[in-house]
Image (spheres, rainbow, N blue to C red):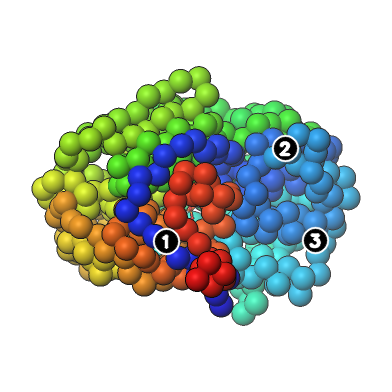
Amino acid sequence: MTDDVLLVHGGNPLEGEIQIRGAKNLVPKAMVAALLGQGPSRLRNVPDIRDVKVVRGLLQLHGVTVRTGDEDGELILDPSHVESANVADIDAHAGSSRIPILFCGPLLHRLGHAFIPGLGGCDIGGRPVDFHFEVLRQFGATIEKHPQGTYLVAPQRLRGTKIELPYPSVGATEQVLLTAVLAEGVTELRNAAVEPEIVDLICVLQKMGAIITMGTDRTILITGVDELGGYNHKALPDRLEAASWACAALATKGDIYVRGADQIPMMTFLNTFRKVGGAFEIDDEGIRFWHPGGELKAIALETDVHPGFQTDWQQPLVVALTQATGLSIVHETVYESRLGFTGALNQMGAHIQLYRECLGGTPCRFGARNFKHSAVVSGPSKLIGSELVIPDLRGGFSYLIAALAAEGTSTVHGIDLINRGYENFMAKLRDLGAHVELPAEALVTA
Ligand code: EPU
């Protein structure tokens, strides 16, 4: 399908300004939270990405009216008439995203039952949902798995409970929050994820009337209430998209002002960016990222849950590390298979070797399980344009960065996947002076 292919003519620095909007990893969840309210909610700073469309479709199937507001990027969500959806209609969303799993708690509260289609999401590891179902069982739900999806029933009002997650999973923490707020009694969650997007979701729920206390040591206490209202909320900016553009500036020796980027949720990234040799300047409206000239420096990097170095920053940064002098070590501790994308970078001329051992830092849960989850990147390498097939969202954007940094033309297949999480990326690339064209455009100019 030629629509899904992009020709990238590399070798030019990306320069200019782009605007980012609300975080992909918060906005769809805040949309799900609207299901819990008795009145309408207003969500602002919503990006036009596919995950938002999927959740909008699923909400509408359940009787929630979703319309755009007067402000650009504003959604009004009215859950006054929540109803059961047709299973076949829900099933049409199978494989589209991971967000549907978060409908469980809100639908159990509103309807007493829920049907969740097969999940999608990036292929960067096993991505099980065992924590989610275990948590829901603890609240009192019964769960039946069927080939086409999962049926859940709450025979009576869900009850608050004590939960300790085996790992601080973002999704499982959100599952607990979205379920506990209307459950009877108090829920104590231990080993919770505390990513900025989770804190923003807690802010949304507090605006709706929830009582949530963040304690020390990854503990969250939720006191269930009988009813929640709507909210009015501006989503926090997408720190993952901001970092992707920062890495694009570094790898292409460019200079990009990311309007909307915020310092606090990016502090760990900014420190690492500086260690590699990137420059940045922060003002009230955004962050300017650039390559200050000279050599980039190799680093040792370990991904981790917040406040560690976010796994979603790893793939774009690895492309920049191919341009750094010396040996960089990357230890991926969140997903077991998030380094597979490096094979294509090697095909372009990079020197990246993968290892099963935990290199560089503390041993992680993947060390004993035979996954290639550490990398040694030897640089700098001259990258040459190549034929690339996008494997996942962040890996895909990383291929675009590599193609833009490379000499010659790359043919990148599967670019539609990038629309899942990067709003208007083609227009942004062009605004930054990237030489990209769809094959049909190339034919016209030939
Ligand atoms: N895990 C389990 N069982 C579970 C849930 C998670 O074993 O039931 C494991 C996972 O396999 C993984 C680890 O726990 O090894 C962390 O997974 P987590 O649940 O935290 O991830 P998620 O909620 O599925 C979200 C983001 C990801 C981001 C991670 C980590 C969304 C829609 N996705 O995924 O974003 O990498 O948190 O911060 O919010 C991306 O944006 O490209 C992306 C993949």
State which mark lies toward you, 3 or 2. Answer: 2
Amino acid at dot 2: Asp
- Which quadrant would residue 70 be assigned to in this image? top right
For the point 26% across and 32% down, the residue is: 292
Q: Secondary structure at mark 1?
A: strand
Q: Which residue is mark 2?
A: 72
Question: How many angstroms separate mark 3 from mark 2 (CA)?
Answer: 24 Å
* Residue 249: quadrant of the picture: top left
Q: Which residue sits at x=30%, y=42%?
A: 253
Give the secondary structure at mark 2.
loop
The foreground one among 140 and 310 is 310
Mark 1 or mark 2, which has the lower sequence index?
A: 1
**Total labels drawn:** 3
Question: Where's residue 427, x and y in %?
Answer: 56, 50
Is 374 situated left or right of 210 in this image? left
Q: Are marks 3 and 1 in contact (CB under 8 Å)?
A: no
Q: Residue at x 37, y 36 (%)?
A: 255
Disc nearer the start of the sequence (3/2): 3
In the rendered image, the quadrant that contains the N terminus is: bottom right
Q: Position of residue 308 (x, y in %)?
A: 33, 38
Say which residue appears at 84% left-offset and 37% top-offset.
Answer: 39
Q: Secondary structure at mark 3?
A: helix
Numbered badge on residue 61: 3
Left or right: 108, with 376 as reference point? right
Q: Label 1: which residue?
A: 8
Identified by mark 3, the residue type is Leu
First in sequence: mark 3 or mark 1?
1
Q: Residue reaching furthest bottom? A: 147
x then y, percent, for residue 210:
68, 32
